[in-house]
Image (cartoon, rainbow, N blue to C red):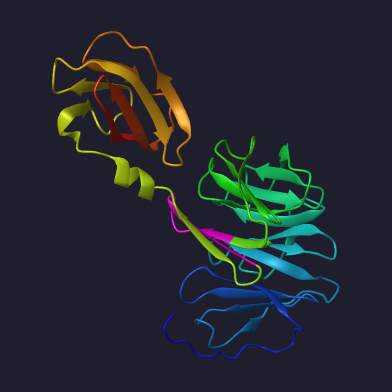
Amino acid sequence: GENWEIVSIPQNAYQYKDLQFVNENTGYLCADFGVLKKTTDGGITWEDKSLSSNHYFTSLFFLNDDLGWMIDMNSQTLLKTLNGGDSWSDAGLNNVHRMYFIDENIGLVTTYNGALFKTANGGNTWEVISNLQYPGSVYFINENVGWYIMNTTIYHTYDGGITWQDDQHFEYTSIKDIFFLDDNQGWLAGDVGFVATCDFTVAIDEAIVSQSSMSVFPNPVSNDVEIKLVDGQVKIKDVKVTNLQGQQIMHFSNLSETNSFNFNVSSLQSGAYVVKVTTEQSENMVKLIVQ
């Protein structure tokens, strides 16, 4: 981003509404009056894929050169293409506001009345999984973890959108977009030049101490894991397991007088967790990888 050059884009739209590239060569532009443009050479030339002028395209989402979706605000419907925009079909949803697809099968759509729809078969069928009352945009990093942007507030889900928690409210800005590089680091952008960033692992990594005082085996783990203190005279009092967002997943308290503790993690989803072990003398934390 240090240097930019202007590329020539067809000027037959009053205002382009969305832009997406699926690789360094193939990209799409959509606009009002049914305008849709496609490039296969990185934006040097653009091919006209426009539909009739009674459409008003506000956003698009492509997973590869062929598979994509587009929202028509005039009809408030979701359209789907299987051939790179050559033809489109109705994806079977009305009152559509925003969309996000995790892969070719799993997608989520918000509506103007605040309903959140989910598909597990590429849009062939849809079901309502929650109702957030007001329209917003949705962004997921996997099938379970995602965010819902509603004006000045961002909500977070850990169960695929079934339940939501109020993460943060920004009093002086309206949030417009969100992007996560991975399941740890992300950014928000909003009005009046607002940009915010978060890194879920920073505080955890800074707090984790040397594991020389205890062992965790096996790690990675898929079933039973054992925590054992090196000093046999020190006793474990409490064990907590949290995800990288700090949400408590497991808690074992009032443990018996022992310097080791075993528990099962087979019910946990694959990923990274933090185990906090409280002893008579100190608190120790260690990352645990669940396979």
Residue at 51 percent of width and 46 percent of height: 142
Residue at 54 percent of width and 90 percent of height: 6
Dominant secondary-structure state across the stretch colored magenta: strand
Figure quadrant of the N terminus: bottom left
Residue 285 in picture, x, y percent from top left: 29, 34
* Residue 198 within the segment the image draws in magenta: no
* Residue toward you, 113 or 213: 213
Q: Is residue 201 left or right of residue 245?
A: left
Q: Is residue 281 left or right of residue 38?
A: left
Residue at 82 percent of width and 70 percent of height: 55
Q: Is residue 268 left or right of residue 189?
A: left
Residue 96 in picture, x, y percent from top left: 77, 55
Residue 71 in sight here: yes
| 71 is higher (above) or lower (below) than 284 | below
* Residue 179 within the segment the image draws in magenta: yes
Residue 263 in picture, x, y percent from top left: 33, 18
Figure quadrant of the C terminus: top left
Q: Point out the stretch of residues depicted in magenta.
A: 178-190
Residue 194 in picture, x, y percent from top left: 59, 67
* Number of marks in picture: 0
| 54 is higher (above) or lower (below) than 197 | below
| 114 is higher (above) or lower (below) than 181 | above
